[in-house]
Image (cartoon, helix red, strand yellow):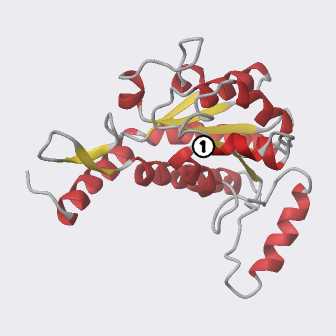
Amino acid sequence: MEIGASEYVHEIKALVDEVSRTQTAAVGDAAALIVKSLHGGGVIQAFGSGHSEAIAMEIAGRAGGLVPSNRLALRDVVLYGDAPVGILLGAAGELERDPSVARRIYDLAPVEPRDVFVLISSSGVNGSVVELASVVKEHGHDLIALTSVQHSTAMTSRHPSGRKLLDLADVVLDNRAPYGDAVLPLQDGGTFGAVSTITSALLAQMVVAEVVRGLTEAGLTPPIYRSANVTGGDEHNRALENRYAGRIRRGA
C-alpha cells in the first residue's frame, strides 16, 4: 500500500461514510437524551482527557454549538479545587489513569440532576473516564459515550471494576477508529495517521445537528453560539450565557 496524504484522505473518506452509515440510530438516541435534558433546563456536561479533550471542546463553548454546555477536565481539580498544580505535571497518562480524580471532578462541577453527560474516550478503558462514568450513573444522569468499539473491546480495562466506558453508557457512539487509531502502514509494522479525532468530531456535530432539529420541531429556539468574530457575536452569546449563569464555565 502506498502512503501519503492522498491515501490518508481516502481512508478518512471511507470512515466518514462508515460513521454516517452505521451511527445514525445512535446519533438520534443521543440527541433525544440531550433534547430531554435541555427541555428540562439541564446542560450538557462534556469530558475528555488527552486528545479526547478536543472533542469536549467541540461540544462545549464553540461557534455553531449549543450554549447550555459545560466542559469538564482533569485540571479542574487544580483550577476549582485545592489540588497542587504538580498533579498535572506527572508522567504522561498518570492522572488520566487514576480513578480517584473522577469523583473530585464531578463534585467540583456545577452539576444538577437534570444534566446529561457526554464522555469521550477512544479506548474507553482508563481509570478516570470509567470512574467518572460510574459516578455519573450513580447520580442518575443519562450518559452518552463516544468511543471506538473496536479499540475498546480489544483492550483490558484499567479500572478496578474491569468495566469500560461503553459498559456504562445509555448510548454508545462508535467513532469506528481501528485498534491503535492510526490507519496507514509503516515498513516496521507500525501505523500512522490517526483518525479518531476527525470521526469523533463528526459524531459530535451530527448530534448537535439532531438536537437542533429536535428543539426546533418542539417549537423551541435552539440556543446556539455565534462566532465571537462576527459583528454582534459577543452580545448574542452573552445574552444566552446569562440564562445559564453559574451552570456553565468558560475558562481554561
Q: State the residue in front, 144 or 104.
A: 104
**In this picture, is 198 found above or below 63?**
above
**In x, y percent, where is residue 8?**
23, 58
Compared across the picture, whether 104 is left or right of 51 comes to: right
Front-lying residue, 162 or 99: 99
Residue at (62, 56) in percent of width and height: 57
Nearer to the camera, 4 or 188? 188
218 left or right of 23? right
The residue shown at (73%, 60%) is 222
Q: Is residue 38 left or right of residue 191?
A: right
Q: Nearer the viewer, residue 235 or 100?
A: 100
Residue 132 image position (x, y, % from top left): 68, 28
Secondary structure beneath dot 1 equals strand
Give the residue at mark 1: 48
State the image quarter where residue 114 is shown: top right
- Residue 74 in the image: above or below residue 14: above
Horizontal relation, residue 6 to residue 221: left or right: left
Quadrant occupied by the C terminus: bottom right
Q: Residue shown at 35%/29% (left/top)?
A: 150
Label 1 amino acid?
A: Gly
Q: Name, please, the residue furthest toward the left.
A: 1
